[in-house]
Image (tube, rainbow, N blue to C red):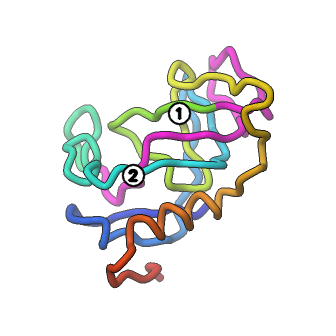
């Protein structure tokens, strides 16, 4: 998958568009193929962006917490959703975020999209990433990490 990741604490100028492993959905998780995502630049100053719940460094991180997309797979014991469902919601602050083609989200943090509120596939993951990339790097000197 591709994601906007940041390797060192700082500003959005450190964001790099690069390959990253597809997250494995854990128990109670849903793997979402991202169609649209949101990013708040102040996230980069939040402690939860940089560490997990036990305080361990989790760099490089993928910011962004709001997501809309389709269910691609389910973790063990996950109920309430099926592969192909259109969903939206928020990710946990202490986990990688939504500025990627895929994100693992706790099922309890998702809701089904109502019919007529946008169809799956109406926005591609690359559109979400490029929009986020553009909005966070306007005027800064950044380049994809190779």
Return the x and y of residue 32 as percentages of the image width and height: 64, 40
2 or 1: mark nearer the eye: 2
- The residue that label 2 is drawn on is 63
- 46 vs 29: above or below: below
Q: Left or right: where does residue 93 sit relative to residue 132?
A: left
Residue 140 shown left or right of residue 73 in the figure: left
Residue furthest front in the image: 116
Residue 77 part of the magenta-drawn span: yes
Say few, some or many: other residues with alpha carbon within 10 Å of mark 1 (under 14 / 14 to 19 / 20 or more). Answer: many
**C-alpha gap between disc 2 and disc 1:** 13 Å
Is 141 or 26 nearer to us in this picture?
A: 141
Q: Which secondary structure class fits the magenta region best?
A: loop
Q: Label 2: few (<14), some or many (≥20) within 10 Å?
A: many
Spot occupied by residue 87 in the image (x, y as percentages of width and height):
66, 31
Residue at horizontal 31 percent and vertical 55 percent from the top: 41
**Quarter of the image where one finds residue 138:** bottom left
Task: Magenta stretch: give its range.
Answer: 58-87
Check residue 132 in the rendering and tell me which mark sits there, or answer none.
Answer: none
Which sits in the foreground, 11 or 84? Answer: 11
Q: Tell me where residue 100 appears, x and y as whole percent.
A: 54, 55
Q: Quadrant of the N terminus?
A: bottom right
**Quarter-of-image position of residue 9:** bottom left
Q: Which residue is rendered at x = 54% and y = 68% of the image? A: 19
Tell me the SS state at disc 2. Answer: loop
Q: Give whichever of 47, 25 is nearer the camera.
A: 47
Q: Which residue is under mark 1?
A: 105
Q: Which residue is drawn at the image coordinates 33% and 37% (left, top)?
A: 94
Q: Tell me where residue 15 appears, x and y as whole percent.
A: 37, 68
* SS for callout 1: strand
Q: Quadrant of residue 95?
A: top left
């Amino acid at each position: 998958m591709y994601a906007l990741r940041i390797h060192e604490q700082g500003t959005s100028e450190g964001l790099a568009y690069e390959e990253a492993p597809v997250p494995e959905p854990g128990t109670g998780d849903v793997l979402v193929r991202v169609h649209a995502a949101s990013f708040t630049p102040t996230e980069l100053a939040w402690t939860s962006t940089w560490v997990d719940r036990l305080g361990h460094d989790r760099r490089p991180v993928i910011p962004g917490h709001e997501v809309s997309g389709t269910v691609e797979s389910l973790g063990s014991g996950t109920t309430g959703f099926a592969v192909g469902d259109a969903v939206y919601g928020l990710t946990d602050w202490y986990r990688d975020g939504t500025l990627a083609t895929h994100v693992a989200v706790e099922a309890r943090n998702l809701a089904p999209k109502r019919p007529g509120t946008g169809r799956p596939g109406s926005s591609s993951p690359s559109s979400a990433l490029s929009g986020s990339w553009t909005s966070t790097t306007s005027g800064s000197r950044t380049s994809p990490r190779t």
